[in-house]
Amino acid sequence: MREVVEKVKMSHRRVSAKDFMMNNEIIKARIRTVRNWLKEGVKFRDVTTLFHEPEAFQLAVDQLAEHFVTQSGVSVTALCSFSEAE
């Protein structure tokens, strides 16, 4: 695992603040908001819509990687999803 983290650190390029904001808007535009889901006043962010656009999904993954690569002593073990039982 340590080798993977080092490889990401070595290959990951820093983006400018302008590019970061632009990428952030692209990602936000592809995440659906479901208002009042489960409870009044709750905004549920449905990221499954992001998965349908590979370029936007890659931007999201890159931004997550950038955040965690620059944090000392922080690791991500897994990304999970939850679905309602039928």
Image (tube, helix red, strand yellow):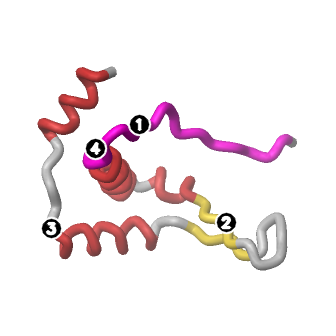
Asked if 64 appears above or below 20 in the picture, the reply is above
The residue range painted magenta reads 69-85
Residue assigned mark 3: 16
Residue found at x 28% / y 43%: 69
Residue assigned mark 4: 69
Q: Are marks 2 and 4 in contact (CB under 8 Å)?
A: no
Residue 1 in the figure: left or right of residue 7: right
What's under tag 4, amino acid-wise? Val
**In this rendering, the label closer to the viewer, 1 or 2:** 1
Q: CA distance from mark 1 to mark 2?
A: 25 Å
Q: Secondary structure at mark 1?
A: loop
Q: Are marks 3 and 2 in contact (CB under 8 Å)?
A: no
Determine if the magenta segment contains residue 78: yes
Near mark 3 (Cα within 10 A), the count class, few <14, some 14-19 or many ≥20, is few
Q: Secondary structure at mark 3?
A: loop
Residue assigned mark 2: 44
Q: Secondary structure at mark 2?
A: strand
Residue assigned mark 1: 75
Query: Please, what is the dominant secondary structure of the magenta stretch?
Result: loop
What's under tag 3, amino acid-wise? Ser
**Which residue extends farthest front?**
73
Q: CA distance from mark 2 to mark 4?
A: 27 Å
Residue found at x 14% / y 38%: 11
